Image: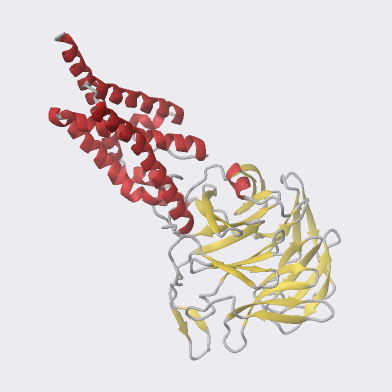
């Protein structure tokens, strides 16, 4: 009879010291690489919004519980808390396995090398150790209720944190990105032989590249980049001194325009002969073909030079209609309203994304405002130092601008934004060879996820475009094709072109 209490006490001590060994080892590993631990926890799809607090709470909690376990008078409290903490960790892993496609391990030390299912088994074994130790200490009604409450409350807390984190990330994002490793998968690449190419667009069968150095030269690739064809566009009138001519594909037509002259040519894909469809007095710096007779443009107000969006009718009866309230002035109406202009053919929607603030504008095909969305960074006002030169009357920047959103592309409901800003819990070193792409759903006005678009040893990606055939990037002289991964396909609507 005397041996049983001693055996029970020994088993309780063994379980307690196993917990101490586990928690001290895990917490010290986290402390030694705390920045990386914060980064990994911050990129979790479950608890991102609370990463800053939880990173400290987990370490302090593990060390605090270890102290309780080595003090005989406080050991039982330590065992209950140990079971609760392991139940929280286990619930976290269960949610990871069922609701997440990828998450880096953030436990530290040797445990980083365990797979998630192995980690789940490991945690369950330690929960059993803790429960057995509590039972061996002498179970009664009070202890039974307390143990049941512990096993129910701990997972519930993680579940509530998860739900609240999801709400914060979708509605009140505190600039924490959720990186998806499998957003894209690289498939093919090819050498372009020079670095002056840009994306002109795509149709059902090919990807088209224009050339800044040779405005009438165009290359057509099949979607897999296995075949390419060179074409030269002929114009019905080529007397104009082009300053910034660009080609845009809007199947079955192509357009060549230079808004600084201003002139618009139109031709049929395959024939590559272009006729003048607009030659007038409406200058513009950006243009998107809506259909065979209409262009959406970004021009400037004659009196002030401020940017303004409008619709340019081409053909026999040229006309222009402005949407004066779409772009919102903050400083000068010129630099502070600069941005990118995209069109979703499937949804018939335009998106204008500001370069220097965290806002994009979504409108219908007639440039009627649908809503103003926000990117996940916190730059609500453009940070620009603008000066007006009295002698020349020019407006210029007196200091380098604070770039927020550099490039964008739009396919179906997904807006892909190249952000220049570093979010919370992100590694700066990755920016040396990769660009961050944030993905937004313009139908639900929600941030979806982010991914890294990698370059090579010397260059970052220069341009990118999302199409029916996949995602493409230009890295110096290299054209790359990526398939859409599961997270991207899952977020993309299927009823559009």
**Which residue does the image show at 78% across and 55% down from the upper left?**
230
Residue for point 36% across, 48% down: 51
**On the picture, is 181 further left or further right than 87?**
right
Residues 168 and 216: in front is: 168
Residue 458 versus residue 356 in the image, above or below: above
153, 366: nearer the viewer: 153
Q: In which quarter of the image is residue 213?
A: bottom right
Colour scheme shown:
secondary structure
Query: Toward which corner of the image does residue 133 lie, by quadrant?
Result: top left
Q: Where is residue 451 in the image (x, y as percent from the top left)?
A: 52, 49
Q: Which residue appears farthest toward the bottom when viewing the image?
A: 391
Q: Position of residue 35 (x, y in %)?
A: 33, 46
Q: Can the viewer see residue 209 in this picture?
A: no
Q: Residue 367 versus residue 36: which sits nearer the camera?
A: 367
- Left/right of residue 369 with respect to residue 204 in the rendered view: left
Please identify the quadrant where the C terminus is shown: bottom right
Q: Where is residue 142 in the image (x, y as percent from the top left)?
A: 24, 30
Where 94 falls versus 244 (above or below)?
above
Task: Please tell me which residue lies in front, 1 or 262.
Answer: 1
- How many numbered discs, if any? 0
- Point out residue 334 in the picture as x, y percentages from the top left corner: 54, 79
- Quadrant into which the N terminus falls: top left
Q: Determine whether 451 is above or below 108 in the image.
A: below
Residue 124 appears in the rendering = yes
Find the residue positioned furthest to the front.
141
Residue at 74% in and 68% down: 290
């Amino acid at each position: 009879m005397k041996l049983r209490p001693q055996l029970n006490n020994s088993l309780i001590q063994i379980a307690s010291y196993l917990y101490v060994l586990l928690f001290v080892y895990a917490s010290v590993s986290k402390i030694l690489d705390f920045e990386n631990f914060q980064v990994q926890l911050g990129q979790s799809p479950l608890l991102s919004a609370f990463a800053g607090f939880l990173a400290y709470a987990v370490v302090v909690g593990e060390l605090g519980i270890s102290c309780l376990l080595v003090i005989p008078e406080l050991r039982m409290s330590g065992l209950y808390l140990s079971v609760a903490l392991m139940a929280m960790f286990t619930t976290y892993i269960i949610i990871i396995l069922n609701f997440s496609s990828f998450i880096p391990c953030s436990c530290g030390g040797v445990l980083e090398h365990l797979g998630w299912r192995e980690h789940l088994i490991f945690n369950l074994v330690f929960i059993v150790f803790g429960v057995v130790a509590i039972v061996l200490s002498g179970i009664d009604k009070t202890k039974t209720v307390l143990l049941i409450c512990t096993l129910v409350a701990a997972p519930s807390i993680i579940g509530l944190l998860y739900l609240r984190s999801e709400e914060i990330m979708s509605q009140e994002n505190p600039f924490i990105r959720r990186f998806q490793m499998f957003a894209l998968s690289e498939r093919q690449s090819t050498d372009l032989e020079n670095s002056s190419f840009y994306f002109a667009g795509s149709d059902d069968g090919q990807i088209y590249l224009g050339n800044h150095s040779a405005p009438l030269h165009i290359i057509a690739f099949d979607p897999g980049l296995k075949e390419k064809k060179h074409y030269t566009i002929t114009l019905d009138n080529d007397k104009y001194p082009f300053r910034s001519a660009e080609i845009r594909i809007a199947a079955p037509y192509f357009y060549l325009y230079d808004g600084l002259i201003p002139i618009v040519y139109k031709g049929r894909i395959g024939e590559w002969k272009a006729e003048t469809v607009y030659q007038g007095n409406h200058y513009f710096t950006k243009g998107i073909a809506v259909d065979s007779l209409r262009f959406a443009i970004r021009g400037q107000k004659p009196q002030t030079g401020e940017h303004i969006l409008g619709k340019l009718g081409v053909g026999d009866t040229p006309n222009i209609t402005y949407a004066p309230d779409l772009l919102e002035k903050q400083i000068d109406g010129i630099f502070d309203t600069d941005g990118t202009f995209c069109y979703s053919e499937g949804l018939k929607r335009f998106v204008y994304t500001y370069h220097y603030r965290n806002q994009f504008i979504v409108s219908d095909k007639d440039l009627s405002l649908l809503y103003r969305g926000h990117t996940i960074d916190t730059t609500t006002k453009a940070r620009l130092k603008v000066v007006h030169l009295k002698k020349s009357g020019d407006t210029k920047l007196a200091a380098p601008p604070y770039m927020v959103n550099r490039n964008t592309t739009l396919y179906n409901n997904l807006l892909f934004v190249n952000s220049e800003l570093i979010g919370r819990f992100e590694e700066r070193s990755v920016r040396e060879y990769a660009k961050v792409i944030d993905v937004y759903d313009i139908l639900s006005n929600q941030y979806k996820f982010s991914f890294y678009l990698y370059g090579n040893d010397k260059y970052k990606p220069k341009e990118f475009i999302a199409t029916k055939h996949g995602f493409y990037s230009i890295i110096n002289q290299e054209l790359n094709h990526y398939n859409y991964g599961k997270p991207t396909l899952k977020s993309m609507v299927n009823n559009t072109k």
